[in-house]
Image (spheres, rainbow, N blue to C red):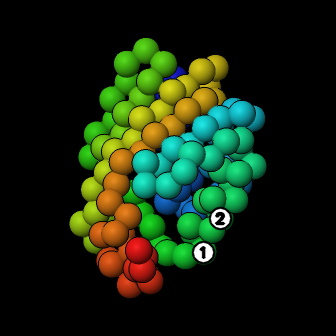
Amino acid sequence: MKPKEVVEQFVALFNKADAQGLSELYAENAINHQVNTDPLEGKENIRRMFETEFATAEMVCIVENIFQDGNWAMLEWKDPLGLRGCGFFHVIDGKIQFQRGYWDRLSFLRQHKLPLPTE
């Protein structure tokens, strides 16, 4: 799959809250770095992160734009509550090698009525 197709599949699986399916899109030693958390390495750690997130809040990714440039795909998204963000996916041989996401964690927590950090 081309990088754009991988991201389209990512969105479809994300919207089904399919942590296992999502993890299969990643290379064994992939890195997922959401900039408001520490980077995760390895598809198993990434799968566990998705499982935890899906158990915490109902999340929906609405695609605004997907761009592709070589081995990179860029996703600009929003959710039904108004949160916006973007993600960068480095895809080699149909697998995500590296992902970086930018979004506001504090707004996410407030919108989902989740506990706010105390520090």
Whether residue 66 is visible here, answered yes or no, is yes
Residue at image location 40% in from the left, 41% down from the top: 87
> What amino acid is labelled 1 in the image?
Ala
Left or right of residue 91, residue 83 in this image: left
> What amino acid is labelled 2 in the image?
Glu
Tell me which corner region of the image, top left, top right, bottom left or bottom right, holds residue 60: bottom left
Q: Residue furthest top?
A: 70
User: How far across and down, in percent of the image, does residue 57 sit?
Assistant: 49, 75
Residue at image location 24% in from the left, 66% down from the top: 82
Total marks in image: 2
Residue 4 shows which numbered tag? none
Front-most of 58 and 116?
116
Give the position of the C terminus as an image quadrant: bottom left
User: How far across and down, in percent of the image, does residue 27 sit?
Assistant: 69, 32
User: How far across and down, in percent of the image, does residue 76 sit?
Assistant: 31, 43
Instruction: Name above or below for residue 82 compared with residue 115.
Output: above
Front-most of 107 and 9?
107
What residue is shown with label 2?
A: 51
- Mark 2 and mark 1 in contact (Cβ < 8 Å)? yes
Residue at image location 32% in from the left, 77% down from the top: 111
Instruction: Name above or below for residue 93 compared with residue 100.
Output: above
**Circle 1 SS class:** helix
Left or right of residue 89, residue 79 in this image: left
**Circle 2 SS class:** helix
Whether residue 80 is visible here, answered yes or no, is no
What residue is shown with label 1?
A: 55
